[in-house]
Amino acid sequence: MENMQYAEELVREFLVFRGFTDTLQALDNELSTDIGKGFHVDKLLDLIFAIYIPRFQVDKLVGLLNFFKHCFSNLSENVLVDTLLKLEGYILRYYIVYAIQSGRKDMVLEFFGIYGNELVQKGHDWTPWFAIPYLKNPSLDPQFRIYFSKEWYEGLRLSVRNFFNEIFNEFFLTKPRIPALLKISSDKNTVNHLKKDIKQLNLKLSQLQALLEEKEALICRLRSSAGNAPSTLGTSVGQANSITSSSGMDEENFILSVSDKEIDVPATPGLGERELNPERAVGEPAKNVSRPRNESSSISDIDIESGKSDVSHMNCDNSYKDDGCQMQGEEEFPEVKVDFQETFLGHTSAISRCRFSASGNNIASASVDGTVRIWTYDSSTSASRNATIYCGAEIMSLDWECKSDRLLLIGTADGGIKAWNVDAKRVVCDLNTSEAFPSILDLKCSPVEPIFVSAAASRRHGSNYIESLGFASLTVWNMKTWRAMSSLPLGEDPPAITSLSFNHNGKILAAAATDGMIHIFDMAAGLQITGWPAHDTAISSILFGPDETSIFSLGSDGKIFEWSLQNQGHILWSRNDARFCDPGTSKHCRHEMALDANGRKLLVTSGSVRAPMYQVRGYTNGLKTLPHSAAITTVDWHPTLPIFLTGSADNSVRVTSIL
């Protein structure tokens, strides 16, 4: 009953919104005489046999039957569709019979004129019926006589009644078909319950994560204290040796006294750059306590000069950061307040790119194994566009067509650019750049014109991602002909372009290079109009600001700058993201950043399991996301809503809505 009332309120709201006042009055009149709240099969029969057929409203009759076929085809109920197709044929035959009995052969001719070709395609059993308007007495013809009998009409009416009863009435089915409007209320309640459960789970996860971080920090402080107090340790060892020589204390007590002394040393402020992995922090000190008694316990076993000892191997190497270990200093960032969070687990390798579509309804995510998945996080959005695309090469760039969600551009490490049509579910164009520039580092569609720009790079030997990039090539492509239109000038042997960004009208293109330069192009003229050295290192990502009077740049060293376009070279805002921006996590893709729809929150990828979210020109340091289980390799914001994406080296993509 609650679902029925909610559905009626939705219908009323829609009718008022559209101004259908006469329909609203008719609805109220119908509801006032409505005795039951279930499906009334008799009213449907009257609509077919007492209104549409007697009034020769064949277009409405066919429309009603097509509506039911569409409903059942969406449910993949093949048996129901086949049965309805048979009943449709008999109902249309009765329409012809009724028209002839009423002396309206003109309506029969009109019917065949409109639907004749469609009927012939359905089957050869309709062919003889085209002659019925020209027969003098079709009711006496052996081929048509049965259709003019009262028994056949009553049998047809009974069959139609039984069919719709089977579908809609719970008396005949344990799971009757419920109209979609009646499901909205229950679906809404289900979603609300799920959201509450997710909030509770996120709260528990945050509490457990905070507890884990607290324990890790405690362990790290203890190990740091042990390593940063060599002089105290040396004094303790000397005292222990003198006591041993004078009083004959055995070697085991000496080792225990050293261990106790280390633990009592107070923690110092300089804990190092990253927190330690708890397994290693707990496991390593035990080596020294369990030293065999026959080993020497002299001072030479402890490296006083270098400040190291077996008890305190506490240097954090790069492997900790690569494994997504929490970095020291994150605690100053409060955790973002989450409305809901969904996790997509459709990939089998690390995520290299993820992007919202122009409307935000669809998401494209790519992994380093060359797989692209198109999916949606909202259960109310149709999943008809969901697809898996196997590209056969590492995915380096993704971008959606700006005017619609119809086309997705995919750039690969073998010089390929694929255009995927999400409606047709196929590759509509497969382009290839020259062999000299095999890496498609970035793709950007114009927000206005049917063009896109590709940033390709040559390859060379290098120890990391940036150093392996060679020279650059910027090509402008036509999305109607799928041909190269022109190349943007960069000079002789230009450093690789890693990131591209259009302004709102597509007239200006910003490009970031590995030599730290920002290039600005006039797309109408196809020329570079300005540029300036922005970083001492390679630039990983570039974005236009919300009012397009500034440009954001992220260097491979972790420095973030907001540059004024009105006063070139002037920095409006900056942050140092070095502790999150680890070059080691750029093995498969560059670090990147994304601005929210209001241009106030800047989300950045991270070598840690959490991504920082900076408040642009704000007074607070920023926020941190809920943790993945590995480094965060790609980020994006919803085009209009406070919802962001994080892709991780743990093979997952998360959709997070914040409060």
Image: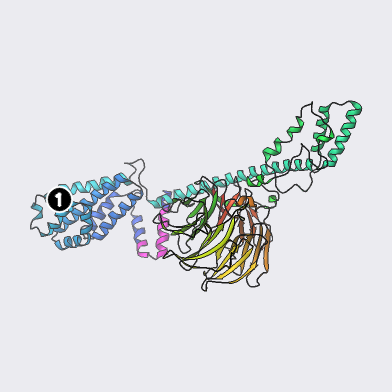
Residue 505: percent from left, percent from top: 52, 70
- Inspect this view and state whether residue 595 appears: no
Q: Residue at x 69, y 50 (%)?
A: 331
The structure's colour scheme is: rainbow
Q: Nearer the viewer, residue 592 or 486?
A: 486
Which residues lie in the magenta part? 6-24
Residue 234 is left or right of residue 351, and the answer is right
The residue sitting at 48% across, 47% down in the picture is: 190
Q: Position of residue 549 (x, y in %)?
A: 61, 70
> Could you tell me residue 189's position as x and y percent?
48, 48
- Work out whether residue 35 or residue 222 is closer to the camera in this orientation and state it: 222
Pick whichever, 540 or 463, lies toward us. Answer: 463
Residue depicted at x 88% and y 32%? 241
Q: Is residue 381 left or right of residue 568?
A: left
Mark 1 — residue? 147
Q: Main secondary structure of the magenta part?
A: helix
Magenta span contains residue 185:
no
